[in-house]
Image (cartoon, grey):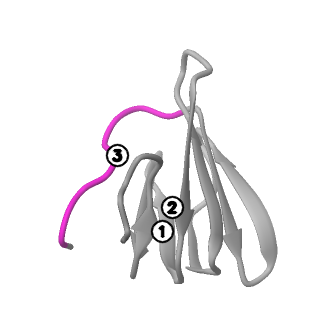
């Protein structure tokens, strides 16, 4: 990976996969999925949300951990001129 964008605790991660939008909560069953371009939302234990737009990629869930690998993402405030 070129960079890590978020590392920390989350109570919910929502991503768009080939099968539609899916949310991952603590204790979610293991999953390996293909991500579609769209919004990725991370909600921390305090309820604060972090949103970013992602390109295609993969999501892996297991052992109370969500790993998202994407080709490209866009964060608020980034200059793409």
Name which of mark 3 and mark 1 comes first in the sequence: 3
Query: Is 77 situated left or right of 10 in this image?
Result: left
Circles 2 and 1, Cβ within 8 Å, touching? The answer is yes
Residues under numbered marks 3 and 2 in contact, where contact means CB atoms less than 8 Å apart: no
Residue at 69% x, 76% y: name it: 17
The magenta segment is: 2-10
Q: State the residue lying farthest toward the front.
A: 81
Q: Nearer the viewer, residue 81 or 39?
A: 81
Please give left or right for residue 68 compared with residue 38 in the image.
Answer: left
Q: Residues within 10 Å of mark 2 (few under 14, many from 20)?
A: some
Q: Secondary structure at mark 3?
A: loop
Does dot 1 land on a helix, a strand or a loop?
strand
Q: Which residue was labeled with disc 1?
A: 60
Q: Quadrant of the N terminus?
A: bottom left
**Outermost residue toward the top?**
46
Q: The C terminus appears in which quarter of the rendering?
A: bottom left
The disc at residue 79 is none
Q: Residue at x 53, y 83 (%)?
A: 56
- As rendered, which of 15 and 25 lies closer to the eye? 15
Indicate which disc residue 6 carries.
3
| Residue 3 x %, y % | 20, 62
Secondary structure under the numbered disc 2 in the rendered image = strand
Residue 22 lies in the magenta stretch: no
Disc ID at residue 61: 2
Residue most toward the left? 2
Q: Compared with residue 15, is residue 1 higher up or lower down, i.e. above or below?
A: below
Rounded to the nearest whole Å, what is the CA distance between mark 3 and mark 2?
Answer: 15 Å
Q: Position of residue 78 (x, y in %)?
A: 37, 55
- Taking the spot 75% from the left edge, 61% from the top edge, the residue there is 22
């Amino acid at each position: 990976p070129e960079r890590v964008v978020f590392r920390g605790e989350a109570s919910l991660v929502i991503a768009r996969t080939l099968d539609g939008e899916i949310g991952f909560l603590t204790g979610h069953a293991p999953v390996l999925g293909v991500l579609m371009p769209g919004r990725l939302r991370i909600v921390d234990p305090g309820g604060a949300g972090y949103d970013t737009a992602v390109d295609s990629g993969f999501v892996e869930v297991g052992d109370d951990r969500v790993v998202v690998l994407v080709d490209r993402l866009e964060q608020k405030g980034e200059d793409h001129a």
